[in-house]
Amino acid sequence: MLSTTSLTRRGALLAGFGAALGLPAIRPASGQGAPIKVGVLHSLSGTMAISETALRDTVLMMVECINGRGGLLGRRVEAVVVDPASNWPLFAEKARELLQVHKVDATFGCWTSVSRKSVLPVFEELNGMLFYPVQYEGEEESKNIFYTGAAPNQQAIPAVEYLMSGDGGEAKRIALLGTDYVYPRTTNRILRGFLNSKGIANADIMEEYTPFGHSDWQGIVARVKRFAGEGKKTAIVSTINGDANVPFYRELGNQGIKAEDIPCVAFSVGEEELAGIDTRPLVGHLAAWNYFMSIPGAPNAEFKALWQAYIKNPKRVTNDPMEATYTGFRMWTQAVAKAGTTAVDAVRSAMIGQKLMAPCGFEEEMLRNHHLSKPVFIGEIQADGQFNIVWKTPNAVPAENWSPFIPENANRRRG
Amino acid sequence: MAARLPGSCMKHRSIGLLLLVLAVLLPGVAVSAQQQDAFAAQVAALAGGFAQQAEAVERLGASGDPRALPILRALSEGRLRKLPDGIVLEPGAEAPSEAEAIRINNRVRQALRGALGRLSIVSPDPAERLAAAEAVFRSRSAENVPLLETALAREGVPRIRAQMELALAASRLVATDESVKRAAIARLGGSGSTDARALLLEARAANPSLLLEIEAATAAIDRQLAIRRTGETLFQGLSLGSVLLLAALGLAVTFGVMGVINMAHGEFVMLGAYTTFVVQEACRGVPWLLPWSLPLSIPAAFLVAALAGAALERGLIRHLYGRPLETLLMTFGVGMILQQAVRIAFGAQNREVLSPAWMQGTITLPWIGVPVTQNRLWIIVFGLLVFALVVAAIRFTRFGLEMRAVVQNRRIAATMGIRTGRVDALTFAFGSGIAGMAGVALSQIDNVSPNLGTGYIIDSFMVVVFGGVGSLAGTLVGAFTLGVVNKVLEPWAGAVLAKVAVLVALMLFIQRRPRGLFALKGRAAEA
């Protein structure tokens, strides 16, 4: 199940893109020195393969790109790809293999929070370095992990604030629907605290969980419809993850729930997930992310061109976790260049304060809490499966990984 | 969180171009210069920020100006374009390349629905009038009353009349006269609609003097809704049951009749779903064929899955008859190989299978008033048809007779001249083919992804074991029983617990009756 991939074949092609990215020109990688190894820990089979394969490709693209520019510190970069097969304990085993057998210098990986929780003790024990590229529920901070996705205050809270604002429809009742695992449950706990603080009573909050891959949404959607029939404007906040989204949206469309009546904002649905759905009945439903493929500007245009050239498909979409992987990888190369070594401790201190003009069009900075400052965007689904951005923050927002809406965090330091 | 909306900077420019075109388009409409100015200003505001857009849309709707209809319709469909400097272009005209579509948000969409409703309520097309009446019902305001009264006086179609009356009642709810309000409340109470209930509850705060009437009206709606809810739950249960039936029928043949534990059964379902996708893509080239791609894929999916099944039986399973454990492990491995093969061939991403128009949306069952989604209704029908087909094939065909003979006593069947090996292959292919047909149906409600089958394999075995191994009638009754029980429990326990409860109940049931609901009796059962 293990394949060691060394990529050089399209290096020359991508060298041009490297130049466009403004990477420092270094002489071509000669064979001197052992290659720098980068681990890729994403599921390539099982339920999460749908989302995670694109992230593996993103890392491979970045490796090829940097080798085309002459490598890092004059050494070639080599990707070691393993497949944890959507199996959470296997994630820990594969992480150990990457660190002990392959002695990788940095690892890019994980999607679900449960997989990250599974590898965290391994990375701490063996002092590895993991870049985690997905928005998550917060409540975590490890010196061995850099979180390049959003914390709740960079996604969930602004999205609900938007729903309650005039433009979002002034929602007074919220249905929280999610998949039954740690990310939706924690996020909804934070959101409940936030809603209560805004004067929304528990009677006006509905909370429902379903198993992974749930496909029969008739009952739940019918219940949401009834919940909405109480004379107050209602909105859905969805933390439904993975495959289950497709039948969920299909049911919304078939039961005639229009975005004008009950808007649904999702935190785990991006361009990639919409690729398998007929989006015409869903126009107007929302998603909150820190990046959308439709963002204008040169940094995003470069990112999209690089990706579509690498994958050799001009129609392939980009999405938020891919952008977070890309940003994390480039910050890591910057930190390695600054530290002059790939040693974990040196790179870790060099990481803090790294800045990058990210494809989202804002400068992002790695903060002391190992999280990024990121802008927040809210987009409406369009008929072509892309998002029309209807709201954004004026600046990048620093991450609050310990949410003030969870009572136990009252005494913790923030920021 | 103070944030500026993108594109909220608006430029006031003349829209002379538009007006010129409009004047040519509508020579019969005589408009005073003043009216024209107001109209032009509102149209210009459509290129502004979302708040301005919503306001302009509302004004245009209230103006009753027929020139506004095509513009607003174009806006709602994303066809209205503007130049970079904010000039709104006339819909349908040749647009210069730098023109971009005007974007809207939910607030504008909501305003548009009301405005379009008001403008098209006098349309000659009955379907448009009905949609307009529904839209006006949702965007009730006292200003709509005279408009609805005139429309109602002209209306002849009873269904549209009823909807207009409801809309009128909703609009009168915000009127000033108490007795008019009272009549409106009574009318809404008789409607039995959830939307009317929401309106009444919303009106409570504003009308303390009418609280009793409102309570009575909502109670009347609640009674109607309770009946409808029972119907809905029953339908949902039957729908889940039909999905289980489709998934399990093939297994009822391969496992129930032949006794082969085929863990790759789910993958045959998945192959059927991918065949549907391939047929659809093949039909794309021929536009008139596209709506029929779904019916066309039924025989195609049957053939593909049946061929895969025959290959599996001839290639592997026949060497392992009588060794259930090896068969289980081997077919499990084959299932994984099939999954990964499809993943390599089609990618890990979901594939989009379109629903034909006749399978989208909701219809209301005429005699009980229960709203049902069309795709689920068709799947119930399809499930029963496939069941009838399987029963007929086994009962009335030569192949079915041979199959039963081989199952009951292989050696005697062989001495009668039946080629038992060939019958085994055909039976297995038949069961697999049915799984393929199930895949066609599942492509309409689930993801077409390489993992499609894994979600159904456990459920399928559950249905077959519960119904009684070897009994097709048991599979039918078992599937629908499990579906309905699951859906009845779901609102009480939640989706996760309901499933757990059903599994526990099933375990207890199997303890009491190891052979399931419809146990086979006689020699065949002991064999």
Image (cartoon, coloured by chain):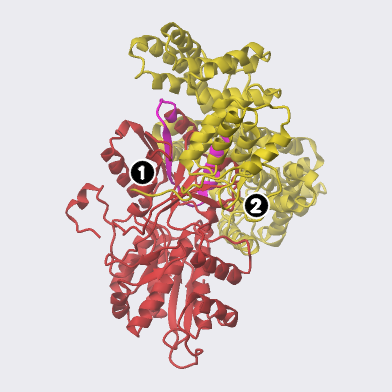
Find numbered disc 2 in the image and state the secondary structure of the residue it sits on: helix
* Mark 2 closeness class: few <14, some 14–19, many ≥20 residues within 10 Å: many
Horizontal side of A316 relative to A400 (left or right) equals right
Reply yes or no: does residue A33 show up in magenta: no
Q: Which residues are magenta?
A: A228-255
- Residue highlighted by disc 1: A161
The three-letter amino acid code for the residue at tag 2 is: Phe
Image colour for chain B is yellow
x then y, percent, for residue A29: 50, 89
- Residue highlighted by disc 2: B268
Q: Residue at point 36% right, 48% down?
A: A158
Quarter where residue B504 is shown: top left
Horizontal side of A238 relative to B401 (left or right) equals left
x then y, percent, for residue B97: 66, 56
Which labelled disc corresponds to residue B111?
none
x then y, percent, for residue B141: 48, 21
The three-letter amino acid code for the residue at tag 1 is: Glu
Nearer to me, A325 or B521: A325
Please identify the residue farthest to the top as the structure is shown: B179
The chain letter corresponding to red is: A
User: Chain under label 2?
Assistant: B
> Is B4 drawn above or below residue B19 in the view shown?
below
Nearer to me, B333 or B23: B23
